[in-house]
Every structure is written in structure tokens, then in C-alpha cells.
Amino acid sequence: MTVDRKTDARERLLLGSIVVKAGLARADRAFLLGGLMELARLGRDSPERQRLRKAGEEAFGAEPSAAPSPIGEATE
């Protein structure tokens, strides 16, 4: 497996684990995609984005947000 394929597989696994952690493992794909599309529209400095980020950090157990994310924030 090439490095690119390993990286892609790791990103997919991490994204899937986030869906499970959020309690959405049984949600239909259209619902998930629609929700993610709405999230992608939030501005970088929007209060809603900051509120959601804080909730996510708390759900992850306050993991350091300074650590580089393998998923990244490509929409910004």
C-alpha cells in the first residue's frame, strides 16, 4: 500500500470514528451529507463554529487543538 493510500485510508477511518462518536452511525447518508454541507458554510470566525468546536473538543476529552489534524480543514 502506498503512502498516499495509507493516508487516505487513515483519514476515512478517522472520519468514520467521528461519526460513530457523535452517535450518528445509523443515520442515513443524505442526512449526514446535508449536515456536513451546512457546517462547511459556517465562516471561520462565526460564533456557531466556535460553539461547535468547543463542544467537539469537550467530546474528545479536551485533546490539544494545537496538534495537527490529519483530516485538516480544507474548506477554509
Image (cartoon, grey):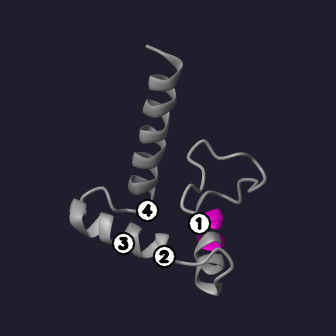
Q: Return the x and y of residue 34 as percentages of the image width and height.
A: 31, 71
Q: Is residue 8 left or right of residue 67?
A: left
Q: Earlier in the sequence, mark 1 or mark 3?
A: 3
Element type where label 1 sits in the image: helix
Ranked by sequence position, the earlier of labels 3 and 4 is 4
Q: In the rendered structure, find residue 19 and report the number of the disc placed on it.
A: none
| Disc 3 target residue | 35
Q: 71 and 13: which one is in front? A: 71
Q: Which numbered disc covers residue 41?
A: 2
Looking at marks 1 and 4 on the same chain, the residue that comes earlier in the sequence is marked by 4
* View extreme (bottom): residue: 47
From the top left corner, tell me how far across and down residue 46 is, in percent.
64, 83
Name the kind of residue labelled 3 in the image: Gly
Q: Element under label 4? A: loop
How many neighbours does mark 3 have within 10 angstroms: few (below 14), some (14-19), or many (20 or more)?
Answer: few
Tell me which amino acid carries mark 4: Ala
In the rendered structure, which disc, 1 or 2, sits on the residue that comes first in sequence? 2
SS for tag 3?
A: helix
Up-down relation of residue 38 to residue 36 (above or below)? below
Query: Could you tell which of marks 3 and 2 lies nearer the N-terminus?
Result: 3
Residue of label 1: 56
